[in-house]
Image: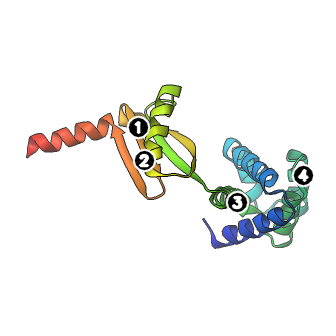
Amino acid sequence: MSRAAIRYAKAILDIANSNGKATNVNEDMKSIVTAVVESAELKEFLSNPTVKGDVKVAALSEVFASVQNETKSLFRLLLENKRFEILPAVASQYNLLFDELNGVEVAKVTTAFPITPELEAKVLAKIKEFSNKSVTINNIVDESIIGGFILRIGDKQYNASVANSLQTLKRELLN
């Protein structure tokens, strides 16, 4: 994450907070991150230096027509400073800062398959041991763990994967 993206995100969060629209702007930023992740064309468009800034602002204003004025101001500011390529990083950093400000932690849960309600309940129970904050679950699918889950919150990790259990058993048998 670039330092510039962090600065822009902090500035837009301060402005949104002072205007009482931080939650709405957070939704805008989530939609920007989702759109860029799902559309390689949009990511390429934003980082393409041959596309004029005015064209980028016009396109973003059309794609994200319902965003808050603070978000539109960010588009114009990035135009003035010729920094459109960092928009996805600014949006992502804004989400992190917003969650931090509101006492919400993001738990990364790696599973071998998309998380089920039963597994989510187990994970939430485990999270209660790690943190007393409100937690949002981010599910990452990685078939190499075979089964179970790996939970990461901040710098803490709990590995309840089948692959980890097999690795531990292998170490014990070799010793």
User: Which of the 4 image quarters holds residue 93?
Assistant: bottom right
Asked if 56 appears above or below 141 in the picture, the reply is below
Asked if 72 appears above or below 127 in the picture, the reply is below
User: Which of the 4 image quarters holds residue 161?
Assistant: top left
Expressed as whole percent of the image width and height from the top left, the position of residue 54 reads 91, 61
As helix, strand or loop, the secondary structure at mark 4 comes to helix
Q: Distance from label 3 to label 1 (Cα)? A: 28 Å
Expressed as whole percent of the image width and height from the top left, the position of residue 39 reads 71, 43
Residue under pointer 4? 61
Amino acid found under the numbered disc labelled 4: Ser
**Disc 1 and disc 4 in contact, CB within 8 angstroms:** no
Please state, as top left, top right, bottom left or bottom right, where the N terminus lies in the image.
bottom right
As helix, strand or loop, the secondary structure at mark 1 comes to strand
Residue under pointer 3? 94
- Residue 53 left/right relative to 3: right
Residue under pointer 1? 149
Which residue does the image show at 84% across and 61% down from the upper left? 75
- Residue 88 left/right relative to 22: left
